[in-house]
Image (spheres, helix red, strand yellow):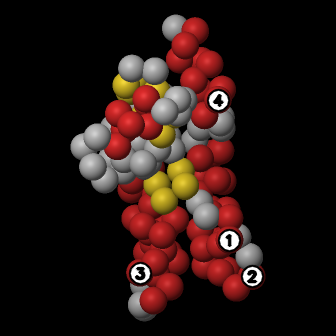
Amino acid sequence: MSSKTLGHLDQTGYLYDSTVGELSGHRKLNNMYEFPLHIMDCNFLFKGITSSVHLSDTWENTKTVINKILDMDLEYLTINFHDRNFRRSHMKWKEWYIQLIEYLIDNGVKFINYRDAIDELDQK
């Protein structure tokens, strides 16, 4: 990604972006919010599908990242799960996503979309 990408997105009227993958909190860039991408399915599961890595190992790695984010007390946690993977032909991916959602619920994480998050932030 070019160092100018986020500025261009802001100038064209985007309300938010979630391109940058890093363990940090949201930030406002002029008129656009940047919500860093914290967890994406293929970052955890691609190796699990193509090698001998087991779902339990993949899940432990995922929990480690989630717990680190929860310890950072960030206002928002961004997850990208590609819906094409939520099917029988990708059972490992589907099981991982279900575990992820259940774990977040068990840890009291509130689910929200970007529009509502932006409204919350703009009211502060």
Q: Name the residue under label 1.
A: 84
Which of the two discs, 1 and 3, labels the residue nearer the N terminus?
3
The spot of residue 47 in percent (x, y) is 41, 81
Identity of the residue drawn at 64% across and 53% down: 101
- Mark 1 or mark 4: name the one nearer the start of the chain: 1
Residue at 52% across, 77% down: 55
Q: Mark 2 points at which residue?
A: 88
Q: In this view, does 42 lie above or below 35?
A: below
Residue sitting nearer the eye, 62 or 78:
78
Q: What residue type is labelled 1?
A: Arg
Are the two marked residues, 2 and 3, in contact with CB atoms closer than 8 angstroms? Answer: no
Image: 73 above or below 94: above
Total labels: the figure holds 4
Disc number for residue 115: 4
Amino acid, disc 4: Arg
**Which residue is more in the foreground, 88 or 67?**
88
Label 3 crowd bin: few (<14), some (14–19), many (20+), radius 10 Å: few
Q: Is mark 3 on a helix, strand or loop?
A: helix
Query: Tag 2: residue type?
Result: Arg
Mark 3–mark 4 contact, CB under 8 Å? no
Label 3 – label 4 distance at C-alpha: 33 Å
The residue tagged 3 is 47
Image depth: mark 3 or mark 4 in front: 4
Rendered residue at 42%/48% (across/down): 19
Question: As displayed, is residue 89 above or below residue 58?
Answer: below
SS at mark 1 in the image: helix
Do the numbered discs 1 and 3 sit on residues whose CB atoms are within 8 Å? no
Judged left or right of residue 70, residue 112 is: right
Q: Which amino acid does label 3 sit on?
A: Lys
Q: Residue at x 42, y 90 (%)?
A: 51
First of labels 3, 4 by sequence position:
3
Between the residue at mark 2 and the residue at mark 3, the CA separation in whole angstroms equals 19 Å
